[in-house]
Amino acid sequence: MKVLRLAVFFATGVLLQNILTALELAPAFTDHAVLQREVFVPVWGSSDQPGATVTISFSGQTKQTRVNTAGIWRADLDPMPANATGGDLVVADGTATVTLHDVVVGEVWLASGQSNMEWEMKNTPGFAEEKAKPANPLIRHLRVDHVGADLPVGHVKNSGWLVAGPDTLGGFTAVGYFFAQSISAKLNVPVGILNASWGGTAIESWIPEPVLRTTHGWPALNAKWQEALKVWPERYAAQPGLEAAWQKAQEELRSKGTKITMAWPRPPMGPGSGFAPARLYNGMIAPFVPYALRGALWYQGESNVGQQHAYAELLPALIQSWRAAWPLGDFPFFVVQLPNYSDNGKATGRSWAQLREAQESAWHVPGAAVAVIIDNDQPDNLHPTNKRPVGERLALIALNQIHDMRNVAWSGPVLQAITREGATLRVRFSFADGLKSTTPEITGFELAGADHAFHPATAKIDGTSVLVSSAEVAEPVAVRHAYTNAPVVSLFNAAGLPAAPFRSDGW
């Protein structure tokens, strides 16, 4: 708890570096901003008038506060209902006035992670159709610049809040856009996506250092960082050549079908790097604390494949540290489980399955949930381009769990229990209404006996159960489903949501 309070201290004190600037608002406050409905809304910034009275006016409310000796001020607006009619938010300190136009009230979500969250609408199937639509003032997006910082900062460059329209949509996070589209269509309220994501980054970059230091993996992370600093000049000089070779390999894959044998050249960690522990929390998350949110969306894990044991500890730590920074209690935190990916020809390997399993640690955190996308139809692509199902499945969770739409199906079949019936294992599922297979034979199941050797298995649907057997396993003791890098899955419920990967063994 002391560590979490320290993280809060860092997050809420970051504006100290902006001492004695002209009247300025925190980076999330721009024209077209979305304010979170039904909670207190902090409005804060800096001023070069210590002791001056700052007046904040919005939607019939007027709040006053004083600039402290460090030049910092903050006041909280009272909770407000949703309002799609844009208004002016006016801040004045007696010397200067800042007016933000077209500010609305609705749902605000922080979208973060690596490249699949950062993936832009302009690279997504259906973009032309979406771009052809009229501007939609109910969907708004703020993109944070890539910034790594050694200590928490108070300001970071960003796009400002943009209304979804033909001229702006291409730069939106595709996952965030389709999520917002689903939410706004159901609730008819503005939805704002605060997009702080950076491709290729590991989870440890997004966690405050005081929290990282409490984890079992900190000594190894810190040692890796110190070693990276030693070799950074050499690796920095070599990086352009590695990136050119990778790009050539990508072009040959597209034109000739030649497999890629080299690993993606991750930019080296070094001074100011976003790939170092805590640096992205400091540079891209801390500047937005305590901007009022509904919750967070997290799509990350590719850069931590092979580190599943550490990830299973770090993901809950990230969730809890962000919640400690924001004064919102256990706000919703939804994780996108990694899709099926062949990992450059290693489709039957287990490393991606293990990372997906580590992501399930989020289920042990109150208010968190996991969206399953194991039925991705581009298993050979590290960046599946169709992000619509991802955003929409996250929205299903939000609508059911947050907005009390209990008639909205939000989960595919989930393992409930396993019982032995002779040479067969009966696998019972929850969320299994209308259990069905999309292929004549159910795929993705394996069985093992006491020898721990897994064999492909056949499966038969029996109500909300599946009967699993294999001619190679006379006395089964363990069953796995979709537990390879790129499993082919066919088991779904009536809502069209796939059965989640699982294994019953702890081997």
Image: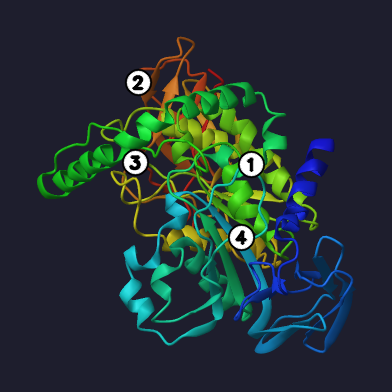
Which numbered disc, 2 or 3, marks the residue closer to the eye?
A: 3
Instruction: Give the x, y percent position of residue 239.
Output: 32, 38
Q: CA distance from mark 1 to mark 4?
A: 15 Å
Disc 3 crowd, CA 10 A, few/some/many (<14, 14-19, 20+): some
Q: Earlier in the sequence, mark 4 or mark 3?
A: 4
Which numbered disc, 1 or 3, marks the residue closer to the eye?
A: 1
Q: Earlier in the sequence, mark 1 or mark 3?
A: 1
Q: Determine which of the numbered discs, if any, sits on residue 449 in the image.
A: none
Residue where numbered disc 3 is placed = 488
**In the rendered structure, which amino acid carries the disc numbered 4?**
Leu
Quadrant hosting residue 265:
top left
Residue 466 relative to residue 257: left or right: right
Residue where numbered disc 1 is placed = 207
Q: Determine which of the numbered discs, if any, sits on residue 110 in the image.
A: 4
**The residue tagged with tag 3: helix, strand or loop?**
loop
Residue 81 relative to residue 220: left or right: right
Is any part of residue 93 visible from this angle?
yes
**In the rendered structure, which amino acid carries the disc numbered 2?**
Ala
Q: CA distance from mark 4 to mark 3?
A: 32 Å
Instruction: Give the x, y percent position of residue 446.
Output: 41, 27
Q: Earlier in the sequence, mark 4 or mark 2?
A: 4
**In the rendered structure, which amino acid carries the disc numbered 1?**
Ile
**In the rendered structure, which amino acid carries the disc numbered 3?**
Val
